Amino acid sequence: MVVGIAESTGSVAASAAGVAAQPARASAPAEPAPVGAAGTPPDDATPTTWRGHTLPRAFSSLRHRNYRLLWFGTLISNSGDWMDQIALNWLVYQLTGSAVSLGLLNFCRLVPILAFTLVGGVVADRVERRRLIFVTQAVSMLLAFALAVLVSTGLVQFWMVLIVAVGRGVTLSFNQPARQSLVSDLVPRAELQNAIALNSATMNLTRVIGPAIGGVLIATIGVAGAFYVNGASFIAVLWSLALMRFPPHRARPHGGIFSDLLAGVSYLRGQPRLRTLVLMALLPMIFGMPYMTMLTVFASDVLDVGGTGLGLLAACSGAGAVVGALFVASRRDAEDRETIMLIGLGGFGAALLAFSASHWLWVSAALLLAVGACQQLYMSINNSLIQEDIDEQYRGRVMSTLFLNRGMVPLGTMVAGFGADLIGVQITMGLMAALLVVAALTAGRASLRSRRTR
């Protein structure tokens, strides 16, 4: 399967070698020009300053008010989410002592994502995306507090955690297509790549902040405190969404859910380059990203560093991802983006392979810096290329397809969990990382052959 997807990258390289040199396809807006749409910059900000302060290129999108609010809410809420993720994995491993249980936990998130994400994309194209995000975040806050109460009262059982995981999967199915699509409503098209990469950097910065706090809480007051703080963090994102200012939402004409869903699939099938980029986004989701869940096993069984060490490992991965995303955000559009994307994929696999073989904490931490940087280099460029190529009226549905790829992470985590119990976590993650390296080399070879034949 890896080779097939990688070979299809040849068509991406052939059609996209001159992407930066070609004018972007115009997408007809289906509603009044949103704040941040192409045209006049919002908030009476100049193109290079905000409130009299010159912004570095990597942070230029922050001059737009609505984007600043989204950024602030994302910073707070995602810090709580990562803190919660670390605590949740630790809780399940302490309850069961099994890597398979970690895989099952993530599988319970996968099922509703597979079932509802495409529907969430249809809904994101119909309603005001900000309101849809508000509702899903409010539900997520209630789930977080419910789990916190169960843990603090000592009533929590493994099956209860699985039910909460299913509920989170449902909310994510509607939240993520809307959230990913909202970014394009907040900034001019010329700053879309910067906004996407900066958003990725912020989300990965929270991977430094959240796990660090989560690790300290696990070591001091236990996992219940992390769950309570996560619930409170949703207040920040709800507040930031409420403060955003948009023109009145104009409903788009639409048919039934199923017919709109088919229309989105038909659109994606008719866009070969866009379709291949979406397929390429699948690779690290299955073979690479499960390492985040398996960090719990590495910290406990391989490195023997406990909850604090687990927080350090996750934080190092997040710090590297911030560096990778800021690198993309600071770059201008270039014709070699597809090549850099594949270099990032190969580096991701190689660094993860080396990490899998390490028995030393600080060596592992350094390698995770490289893992995070290469991972985000690949994913940020891939996401930018996809978003730049979408017609606005199909944006939510295409982004739901992309998030469906991200729903493959729990599937890969289940494979990693079973492999860890059978042959050990180091061998399992090493084999998965090696597949990423092979995929990158195969795709790069296909891309080079395609350019030579043009």
Image (cartoon, helix red, strand yellow):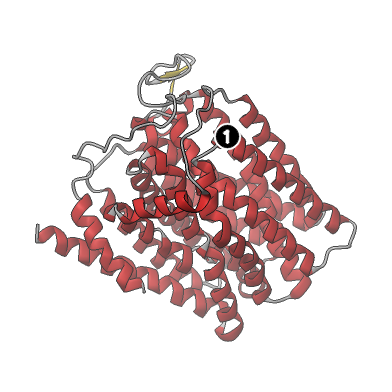
Q: Residue 103: where, in percent of width, then height? A: 62, 71
* Quadrant for the C terminus in the image: bottom left
Q: Residue at x 40, y 55 (%)?
A: 265
Residue at far left of view: 453
Compared to residue 329, the image places residue 269 above or below, namely: below
Q: Residue 108: where, in percent of width, then height? A: 65, 66
Compared to residue 90, the image places residue 301 above or below, namely: below
Please indicate, yes or no, whether residue 20 appears anywhere in the rendered image: yes
Q: Which residue is mark 1?
A: 130
Compared to residue 78, the image places residue 87 above or below, namely: below
Residue at far right of view: 153
Q: Residues within 10 Å of mark 1 (few under 14, many from 20)?
A: many
* Quadrant for the N terminus in the image: bottom left
- Depth check: give the residue in front, 335 or 211: 335
Q: How many marks?
A: 1
Q: Residue 450: where, in percent of width, then height? A: 15, 61
- Element under disc 1: helix
Q: Residue 249: where, in percent of width, then height? A: 53, 27
Residue 192 located left or right of residue 178 = left
Q: Kindly indicate the quadrant of the structure image that contains residue 112.
A: bottom right
Please indicate, yes or no, whether residue 326 appears anywhere in the rendered image: no
- Depth check: give the residue in front, 397 or 19: 397
Q: Amino acid at mark 1?
A: Arg
Compared to residue 338, the image places residue 430 above or below, namely: below
Residue at far bottom of view: 422
Q: Residue at x 39, y 73 (%)?
A: 435
Q: Residue at x 44, y 46 (%)?
A: 323
